[in-house]
Amino acid sequence: MNSNQEILIRIAEALERISPNLDKKIDLNKSDGFVYEAHLKNIKPIIKISRIPINLLKGLENQKEILLKNTENFANGLPANNALLWGAKGTGKSSLVKSVHAEIIANSSNKIKLIEIHREDIINLPYLLSKLAEYVNYKFILLCDDLSFDAGENTYKSLKSVLDGGIEGKPNNIVFYATSNRRHLMPRDMIENERSSSINPSEATEEKVSLSDRFGLWIGFHNISQDVYLEIIDGYVNELGLKINKDSLKSKALEWSITRGARSGRVAWQFILQLAGELNKQINLN
C-alpha cells in the first residue's frame, strides 16, 4: 500500500467518525431539521432552519389550513396523507412546509423531525424510509423541494413504490411532502411524446401521470394579486420594525415587482432584503 492510499483510507475513516451513516444510530436530538446526504447515507443536522413565521405567509389561508390540519393529524398519530404542493415559482410552497413544521413542534410534545431529500436522491428513498422506520419514538416529515422528472428518467418508480407503500406498507412515523412547479411532475411534452409513440397510448402514459395520484393531497399555489403582494410587504415591514413612509414603501415595492416581472412571496422577500440593506437594518425572523 502506497502513501496516497493510506492517506485516502485515513480520510475515509475520519469522515466516517464525524458523519456516521444511518446503519448506525443517529442522535436526532441535535436538531429539528436534517438534510439527507446520499453519498454518506447520513442525515446532517441543520443548526438553524431557514423559515418564515407562518403568520407572515399571506394569501395562503386555504393552503395553510389544509397542510396544518394534515400535519396535526400526523403528529397526533391519526391518519395523514402525503402531500404535493404544486404551482407557480416563489409562491411559498416550501416555505409553508417549513413554517407548518415549526408551528407543530411549538405546540406538540411529539418528536417530529423535518428531513429534506434532494430530487436527485429520490432513488434512495426506500433505504431512507427503512432506516427512519427504526426510530419508533420519532415522527418524520420528508420534504423534497422542486420535484419533477424529465424524459428518460426512471427514478420516479422509486417514489411511486414508496408512496404506494409496497408489500410492507409505508411506515406510520413518516409522511412525504413534495413541492413542484408541475401538477403531474412530468413535462407535458414528455407525456405527449409517450402517447404518440406508444402501441397503447393510454397505458404508456398512465404510469407517469398516475404518480401524482399517489399523493393524497394536492395543494395548489397561484400567482398573487397586487393587494396580497403589498399585504405581504406590510407584514414583513411590521415584523422587522422597518421604518419607512407608507407611500414610499408602496411605490418602491411596486417598482421592485415591475422590474422583476412578477409578484410573489419570494419577490416580496427579496424586496425586503433590499430595503433592509438600504435602511442598515439586520434581519432575524427566527
Image: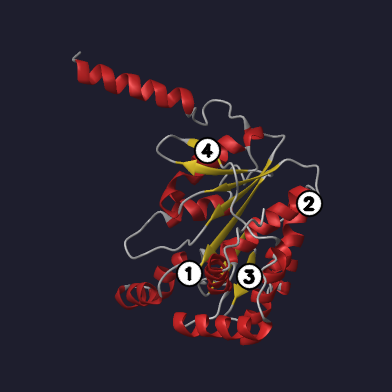
Residue of label 3: 219
Q: Amino acid at mark 3?
A: Ile
Tag 3 near tag 1, CB within 8 Å: no
In this picture, is 144 found above or below 31? below
Q: Nearer the viewer, residue 202 or 121?
A: 121
Residue of label 4: 43
Q: Nearer the viewer, residue 25 or 59?
A: 59
Q: Amino acid at mark 1?
A: Val
Residue of label 2: 78
Mark 3 or mark 1: name the one nearer the start of the chain.
1
- Quadrant of the snapshot with the N terminus: top left
Disc 3/disc 1 C-alpha distance (Å): 17 Å
Mark 2 or mark 1: name the one nearer the start of the chain.
2
Residue at coordinates 77% horizontally, 55% vertically from top-left? 72
Residue 209: image tag: 1
Residue at coordinates 66% horizontally, 33% vertically from top-left? 29
Whether residue 81 is visible: no
Mark 4 or 2: the one toward you: 4
* SS assignment at label 1: helix
Mark 4 or mark 3: name the one nearer the start of the chain.
4
Residue 140, image quadrant: top right
Disc 2/disc 3 C-alpha distance (Å): 20 Å
Disc 4/disc 2 C-alpha distance (Å): 26 Å
With 269 as the anchor, is 72 left or right in this view?
right
Disc 1 crowd, CA 10 A, few/some/many (<14, 14-19, 20+):
some
Q: Amino acid at mark 4?
A: Ile
